[in-house]
Image: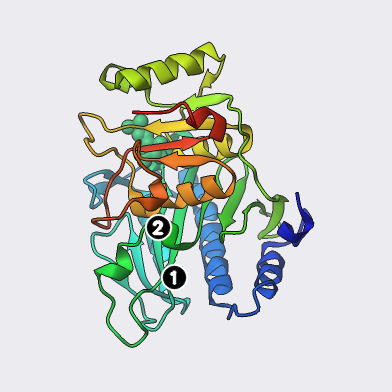
Amino acid sequence: MSIETLSAPVGTALDRFIARRQEEFPHASGELSQLLRDIALASKIINREINRAGLVGIGGNAGQENVQGEDQQKLDVVADIRFIRALRYGGETCAILSEEVEEPILTDSPDGKYIVAIDPLDGSSNIDVNVSIGTIFSIFRRVTPIGQPLTEEDFLQKGDDQVASGYVLYGSSTMMVYTTGHGVNGFTLAPSLGEYFLSHPDIQMPKQSKYYSINDSFHDELSPNMVNFIKKCRADKMSARYIGSLVGDFHRNMLKGGVYMYPATSKNPNGKLRLMYECSALAFLAEQAGGVATDGEKRIMEVEPKSVHQRVPFFVGSKDIMKDFKL
Ligand code: P6P
């Protein structure tokens, strides 16, 4: 890895890493740095809630549905509240797009420079069975000048317009992985210190691939090209790995190589995953790490959003394996 791309050694605290990176951009005014810190802080609180969910009765179903018509888990609600609170009062964000809330949330900082699209807790159906779950976020600059009311143009920005994106994986360890467009770096939480430390500098998605991830129940609905693609994965001795938690499957593929596929199905004709706060964020990370992310026709980062909760087919993974992929 080139020295100029790695401004910090393994073990550097996240705060110090963010500060060093900000120094590399003289015109940076510190708002993005503070926004990343706000997200990291909220993730530590969520991490604590997740780790004790079974003990304090915040596991299980909340008995209500989210805007997507999906059963909300109690921790979905907790995570949504915590992240919205952190972003609403942090001062850098003028609006929040949350998977859990129908309309964009205007914060107490109307002059905030950034808009955050977030899935506060993805894969939450796995909470009760102790499978890794995650937070996914995208950060965009506002388009409308400060002082003017936000418009749809501020909320419907394509992936190429992201300033930063990342995820938090609440797994065997808790990790925050993010990019600001200058490579991907992973930080592991030291629970006893309550700090994230650089553990995976300059992540590069292996070009070859060991795993393919798809819900096998879709097999009879797949196009002939996709059936052949999966046949080739099997012929190339790749292993099937699908944990039903996007962040967990994606993180494994980032580190070990792999391909994750969620096609359009009869149940979800436009795909299940959301463009604004899942696919765009992970596509940015994948491309920064040398991978590929597509909706089957174009780069995910080029898809022009039509609505905040828009769903898209999502195919993301190692460059060499994805070159053979077509719908
Ligand atoms: P299915 C979780 O609900 C999620 O959004 C992703 O985390 C996961 O990869 C996918 O849906 C699982 O969906 O239809 O295979 O259960």
What residue lies at 38% left-to-right and 60% top-to-bottom?
A: 117
- Give x and y (percent) for residue 26: 65, 79
What residue lies at 35% left-to-right and 35% top-to-bottom?
A: 296
Q: Quadrant of ligand 1?
A: top left
- Amino acid carrying mark 1 in the image: Leu
Comparing 265 with 4, the one in front is: 4
Residue bearing the label numbered 1: 87
**Which quadrant of the structure image shows residue 269?**
top left
Mark number displayed over residue 118 = 2
What residue lies at 54% left-to-right and 19% top-to-bottom?
A: 239
Q: Residue furthest top?
A: 235
**Which quadrant of the structure image shows residue 314?**
top left
Distance between the Cα atoms at labels 1 and 2?
Answer: 11 Å
Evaluate if marks 1 and 2 touch, with contact meaning CB atoms under 8 Å apart.
yes
Q: Mark 1 or mark 2, which has the lower sequence index? A: 1
- Amino acid carrying mark 2 in the image: Ile
- Give x and y (percent) for residue 54: 47, 43
- Give x and y (percent) for residue 224: 31, 17
The quarter of the rendered structure image containing the C terminus is top left
What residue lies at 53% left-to-right and 47% top-to-bottom?
A: 287
User: How dense is the environment of label 2, judged by Cα within 10 Å: few (below 14), some, or many (20 and up)?
Assistant: many
Mark 1: is the Cβ under 8 angstroms from ligand 1?
Answer: no
Compared to residue 286, the image places residue 105 above or below, namely below
